[in-house]
Amino acid sequence: MSWTHEFKDALKTREDLSEFFETDFPEIKFPLFIPKVFAAKILMAGPDSPLWKQFLPHSEEDSNLGRLDPIGDKVHAKNNQLIHRYENRVLFTPTTVCPVLCRYCFRKNELSEKDEIFDQKFKEAIAYLTVNPEINEVIFTGGDPFILSNEKLALYIQEFSEVESIKYIRFHTRTPVILPSRIDEGLLAVLTSASALFKRCMVMIHVNHVSELTEDVRDAIALLNENHIEVFSQSVLLKGVNDTTEDLYNLFSELADLKVKPYYLHHPDEARGAMHFYMGLEEGRRIFAPLHNKLPGWALPQYIIDIPGGEGKTSAFNPESFEFNGSLINRNGEKVKIN
Ligand code: SF4
């Protein structure tokens, strides 16, 4: 079956889930979407597994705790497609569609928006990059950019390559884990041509637990490696999913063996509907610190936190103290109070 068929053959309602998993799930306001091919892995892993907890709905999603836009995307949105938070780089959001809907997602309050508005805005995005030459990197995110067709990806890549200042191109994606069949010949050809058009072309795979690295996912990563595509990873620290040093060690050491550079470990965001995955900074620091003793520096990701309200990323690990005094340093070097 092609990846598009696997993608379309999905569980989308509470009734679909109940039938497939033979379990009752709570009625929640956030949308549901799990391709059956991935749902089968969740079913095999069982109800206490990191897979189940990440992708199946929980009654706490209806809690009013947390923020609707926890990292301040809307503060830095330039039009419907670009988010310009840092001087040298932009997030490009060509789609709101994902290969799965993760229950912890910090964008879960935006993912129901329609895609059509995005197409109309692409010309504005190119114009913005042209008059802001300090921007040298475009990061495709979403939604998930690998859900776009190869033709559409190739078109965007070509257009960006014609903006002289853009040197680097990066794809943030969860698709290789959810639908590894997406890493097919056509996509590999698109990525290979992007590698020739830019100084660096990078794929950043979102993966949170070693149990997500099943045989087919490893094969997909091997294909990226064989085609000389640089592969990095980003993970989110999540309560009840990967909140022990051992969980993180197993994940990062396995990724390193697969020739994937662990790049970011995100502290969980205070996202509305995902606060049951949240933990304080002190707890996160205590989980992360022992990794310095267990992993080589090149296999240790940066542990970072997005300061709420659009202040940007900063280091979440303070080597001088586990205790959190209530303020973080933003990208302008100023202290910002957070909860
Ligand atoms: S794939 Fe990414 S953007 Fe989509 S729901 Fe999951 S975490 Fe959110």
Image: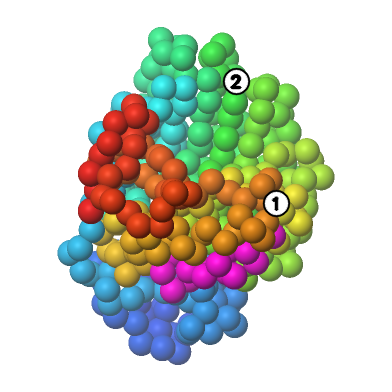
Element at label 1: loop
Please say whether residue 242 is one of the residues in the magenta stretch. yes
Q: Image point 78% across, 38% down: which residue? A: 228
Q: Is residue 290 left or right of residue 78?
A: right
Q: How is the image coloured?
A: rainbow
Picture coordinates of residue 245, whole percent (x, y): 55, 67
Find disc 1 in the rendering and name its residue: 296
- Please state which amino acid type lies under the numbered disc 1: Pro
Judged by depth in the image, the label closer to the viewer, 2 or 1, is 1
Residue type at tag 2: Lys
Q: Eyeballing the image, is 11 above or below 144?
A: below
Residue name at image x 64 percent, y 58 percent? 293
Q: Which residues are magenta?
A: 238-253
Q: Quadrant of residue 23?
A: bottom left
For the N terminus, the image quarter is bottom right
Residue sitting at 41 percent across and 57 percent down? 322
Q: At 48% across and 84% down in the image, what residue appears?
A: 47
Task: Report how far apart the C-alphas of labels 2 and 1 lie in the structure.
Answer: 29 Å
**Label 2 beta carbon within 8 A of ligand 1:** no
